[in-house]
Amino acid sequence: MLTRNCFYTLLAMFLLALTVACNHRQADYRLDYTVCPDTAGHYLNVCLTYETDSTLPHPTDVVLTMPRWAPGYYEMLDFAKHLTDFCARDMQGEELTWTKEGLNRWRVALPKDGRMEVSYRVYANRRDVASSRVERDIAFVAPNGVFMYVAGEQTHPVNVRFQLPDGWQHIATGMRPHADDSCSFTAPDFDVLYDSPLLLGNFYIKRFAHEGHDYEFALETPDGAEEMELEENFKRIVSAATKMMGDVPYDNYCLIHMGQGGGGLEHLNSQACYTDGTYRFATRREEVKFLAFVAHEYFHLYNVKCIRPAELWPLDYDHEAITPMLWVSEGLTCYYEFRLLRNAGITTPDEALQLISTYFSLYAPYEGQHHQSLRQCSYDIWLNFMNPDDNTRDVRINYYFKGPVIGLLLDIDIRRKTQQQKSLDDVMRLLYQRYYHELQRGFTEEEFWSACAEVAGEPLTEVRHLVDTTDDIPYDDYLTDAGLRIDTTSWAILPVENPTPAQQQFLRAMSLEE
C-alpha cells in the first residue's frame, strides 16, 4: 500500500526529474556557430560547437535539423540539398558516429563529456532572397539554410560569429553585434536568427536615426540612391506607417538591398531585396513602382510578422503553414503600398490610382478568376506559386493581384458603413493590438472577419463572399460610392467626373484628391 507520505515523496521526485528534463532542454547546453565564407568556391564553411553543462545529465545522442522553408517564401526549399561534407567530432578530434534521418535531420552520437564539434559546408550561389550567396567581395547569408537547431528546441539561444575574409569591412543585419566584437551576435532563439539575414563584405553602408529609432542602409549597388532620395523617401514611408499603426515594433531596422536578382523578403527588423542594380529609373512610374516595393516589404513587419494568421505562429520549419489567410498577409500588404506612398506624400493621387490599377489589370482580364477563389489561392500557393504551369492564368489567380483589389473594396465598405468614421486602418490596428500585443498569438479566419465586423458595426458578408467564391465582383457597387470608376478596357481606376459632395468626401478621406 502506498502511504500518503510516500506518495508525496514520489510526486516530489517526479516533479524534480521533470524540472531537470525541462532545464536540460534550455539551460544545460550551449550552441556556438562560426561561419567562414569561401569566396572561390561559393561556400559557407560552418562549424557548430555543442557543449552541455557537465553537472547535469545529458542525452546519448543529439538530433540536428535544418529548416525546409523560410517564412514569407511559401515554397518548400529543402535547404539541406545545398549542404555537403557533414562531419561530427569530439573535442579531441575523433570522428563521431552519425546517421541521416529524412531530408533534413542528422542524429549524432554524443560523447560522454557532452561536447562535440559539427562541421559542414553550404553551397551559396543563388540570387534569391531566401538563399545564400558568396562572391569575391560580398556574401548574403539567409540563415534558414545555414544554421541547424536541436530538433524540437528552436527556442534555444544561439551564438554566431563570422570570420571575414581579408579586406572585408562590414556586416549588416537587424541583429545587434556584441559590444566587444562586431563579428559576433547572439539570438535569443532560432526564430530571431532565421528572421535576421546578413550582408557581409564591401558595400555602401549608412547609419542614421529617425523618430527615435536606429536605421542602417546596406546597399550592394548604390548607384543613384542619393539622386532619387532613397533615405528621405524611406523615412516618409516609415513615418506614414508609424502614424497609421501608432507603434514601431523594433528598436533598429536594417535595409539590405542587393544588385541584380529577384524578389524581396520581409523580416521583423529588416528587409532583404534584390534590385535591378541601380536606383536610376527610366521613368517616374518605374521609380514609384520601386518605392511601392520598399513600402510593401516594410509594411510586412506589421502585417505578417506581427499581425499573423494563427497557422504561422508558432512557426514549424518542417511543414507547410497551410492557411486560408495569406490573401490578408500578402494581398492587403499590396493594398497598403499605394496607401502608404500616398499618405507619405510621395505620390500624387493619380500615381496612387495607377498603382492600384496595376493589380486590377493583372488579374481581372484572365479566366483564372472564375476557377479559383482568393481563399483557395491562399491554400494552394504552396503548390504552384514558384512552379506555374502554362495554363496558370486560365485556372488560377494570385493573391498578390486580387488581394489588393479586395483590400480596396473592403476599405470602401467599412468607410461607408461607418460614415467615414472608421476604415481598414482601424481593423489593422485592432488586430495588431489585440493579437500581437495583448494575446501574443495569431488570429484565426473567423477572428479576422469578426474584427472587420467590430470596426464596421456589422458583418461584411458581401465582401467575404467575394473572397470565398469565384463570383463576379460588382465593382461599381463599391467604387461609385467612393467617387471612383473602372475602365474595363484598360482596367484603370479613375475618379468620376463631377463627383457629388458625398463622393468628394470619400476621395478626400482616402487622400485621392489634391
Image (cartoon, grey):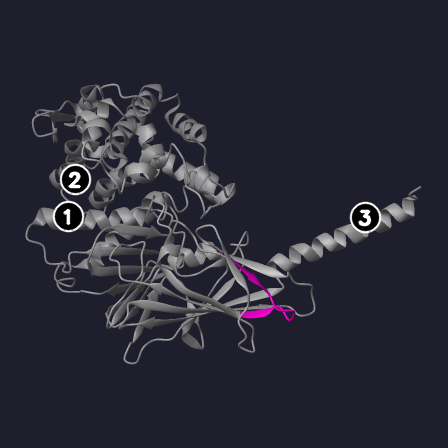
Percent across and percent down for residue 297 are 29, 49
Q: Which residue is mark 3?
A: 11
Query: Residue 30 at what x, y percent from top left?
Result: 56, 66
Query: Which of the marked residues, 2 or 3, is nearer the chain's N terminus?
Result: 3
Q: Are marks 1 and 2 in contact (CB under 8 Å)?
A: yes
Residue at image point 80% right, 53% down: 13
Which quadrant is home to the N terminus? top right
Tell me which amino acid carries mark 2.
Leu
Q: Residue at x 31, y 40 (%)?
A: 330
Q: Is residue 420 visible?
A: no
Q: Nearer the viewer, mark 2 or mark 3?
A: 3
Between 177 and 50, the one nearer to me in the picture:
50
In the picture, residue 222 is in which quadrant?
A: bottom left
Q: Which residues are magenta?
A: 106-116
Q: Position of residue 454 (x, y in %)?
A: 42, 27
Total labels drawn: 3
Left or right: where does residue 21 sit relative to residue 78? Answer: right
Q: CA distance from mark 2 to mark 3?
A: 65 Å
Instruction: Please report whichever mark, 1 or 3, sits nearer to the chain's N-terminal start.
Output: 3
Label 1 or label 2, whichever comes before in sequence order: 1
